[in-house]
Image: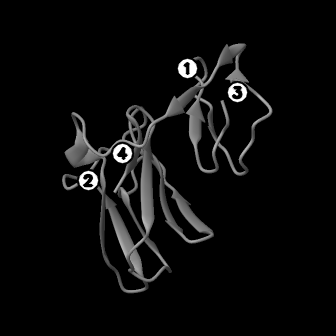
C-alpha cells in the first residue's frame, strides 16, 4: 500500500505519531514497537465533533483556528497536540501544551482551499 504525503500514522503501543512528508511505495506497513502503525483517518463527524472539528475565522494577522465549537479540554492526559493549516505547498503548524487555549492564529490569508487539521492525543485527527 502506498503512503501519501500528509498521511498521519500512530503507534498503539507508545503513541508515537508520524506524518508522511513524501509519497512512498517501497513498504507495505510502517511499524513501531514491532507492530504496524495505524493510519489515522481525518474525521469530520463523530461523537465529540463539537470539541474537535477546527473552526476557522478571520484573525488580526490571518486565519484564526479554534478547536471545536465548544472549547476542547487541555489537560495533561487529554489535549490538542497541534493545529495545522495547509495552503498550496505551505504547511503551517502550531504545537500546543496542556493548559494553553486550543486555538492558534496563522499568517495565512483567509481563502478557499485551505486544509485545516487538529490532532487530539486521545481522539485522533480531525479536519475542517
Labels 1 and 4: the sequence-earlier one:
1
Q: Between tags 1 and 4, which lies in front?
A: 1
Residue at horizontal 36%, vertical 45%? 74
- Which residue is disc 2 drawn over? 68
Structural distance between the alpha carbons of marks 3 and 1:
12 Å
Contact, mark 1 vs mark 4 (Cβ under 8 Å): no
Instruction: Count residues near mark 3 (Cα–Cα under 10 Å), then give few for <14, some for 14-19, many for 20+.
Output: some
Residue 52 coordinates in the image, percent (x, y): 30, 46
- Which residue is disc 4 drawn over? 74
User: Is the residue 33 above or below the residue 74 in the image?
Assistant: above
- Which residue is disc 3 drawn over? 30
- Which quarter of the figure is the C terminus placed in? bottom left
Q: Secondary structure at mark 4?
A: loop
- Which residue is disc 1 drawn over? 12
User: Is the residue 46 above or below the residue 105 in the image?
Assistant: above
Residue at horizontal 70%, vertical 22%? 32
Structural distance between the alpha carbons of marks 2 and 4:
12 Å
Q: Between tags 2 and 4, which lies in front?
A: 2
Amino acid at each position: 500500500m502506498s503512503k501519501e504525503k500528509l498521511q498521519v500514522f500512530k503507534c498503539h503501543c507508545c503513541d508515537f505519531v508520524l506524518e508522511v512528508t513524501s509519497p512512498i511505495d517501497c513498504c507495505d506497513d510502517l511499524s513501531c514497537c514491532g507492530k504496524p502503525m495505524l493510519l489515522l483517518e481525518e474525521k469530520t463527524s463523530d461523537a465529540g465533533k463539537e470539541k474537535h472539528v477546527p473552526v476557522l475565522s478571520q484573525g488580526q494577522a490571518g486565519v484564526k483556528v479554534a478547536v471545536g465549537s465548544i472549547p476542547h479540554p487541555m489537560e495533561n492526559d487529554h489535549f490538542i497536540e497541534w493545529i495545522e493549516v495547509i495552503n498550496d505547498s505551505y504547511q503551517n503548524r502550531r504545537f500546543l501544551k496542556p493548559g494553553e487555549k486550543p486555538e492558534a492564529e496563522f499568517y495565512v490569508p483567509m481563502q478557499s482551499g485551505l486544509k485545516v487539521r487538529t490532532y487530539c492525543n486521545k481522539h485522533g485527527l480531525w479536519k475542517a
